[in-house]
Image (cartoon, grey):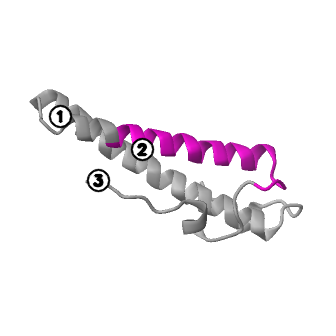
Amino acid sequence: MIAAKETRPDWLDEQFWQRLDRVELHHQRIQSEHETWRRSLDRCRETSNDDLPLVWHRYCEVIAELEQTTAKLEALRTRPDGPNLSGGDHETAFPARLRRT
């Protein structure tokens, strides 16, 4: 869903497009992670797995992150010139967190 450079409106600067690309890539990664944890949750339910509390907790974390990223995309859509994200790199915009696998 990353906008091709030839279809990008001229009135938006390169910084906007860099932010949009960064947020979209992160959103796609989180969507994939959501699907993975959703399948894990289904497997735990089917097998009465003792890992259910851990999987449920991780699933909820991913849902929260997906909501945050969706909000950032919405901010870019509604206020393309606004201060939607820091001007920094991916790690600044989306700080690393401990992952439970």
Q: Secondary structure at mark 3?
A: loop
Name the secondary structure under disc 2.
Answer: helix
In the rendered structure, which amino acid carries the disc numbered 2? Val
Mark in front: 2 vs 3: 3
Left or right: 10 in relation to 85: right
Which image quadrant for residue 88?
bottom right
Q: Residue at x 45, y 39 (%)?
A: 63
Marks 1 and 3, Cα distance to the nearest angstrom?
16 Å
Which quadrant of the figure contains the C terminus? bottom left
Magenta residues, start to end: 58-83
Q: Residues within 10 Å of mark 3 (few under 14, many from 20)?
A: few
Question: Is residue 60 one of those drawn in magenta?
Answer: yes
Q: Which residue is mark 2?
A: 62
* Residue type of the residue flagged with mark 3: Arg
- What secondary structure is the stretch in magenta mostly built from? helix
> Which numbered disc, 2 or 1, marks the residue that appears first in the sequence?
1
Residue 23 is one of the magenta-drawn residues: no
Earlier sequence position, callout 1 versus callout 3: 1
**Residue at numbered disc 1:** 44
Q: Residue at x 73, y 54 (%)?
A: 84
Query: Mark 3 = which residue?
Result: 100
Point out which mark residue 101 bears: none
Q: Percent from the top left, x then y, of residue 48?
A: 11, 29
- Left or right relative to 78: residue 28: left
As measured in the structure, the alpha-carbon distance from the residue carrying label 2 to the one carrying label 3 is 11 Å
At numbered mark 1, what does the secondary structure look like: helix, strand or loop? helix
Q: Is residue 4 visible?
A: no
Q: Disc 1 vs disc 3: which is toward the camera?
A: 3
Residue type at the position of mark 1: Cys
Please tell me how many numbered marks the rendered image carries: 3
**Earlier sequence position, callout 2 versus callout 3:** 2
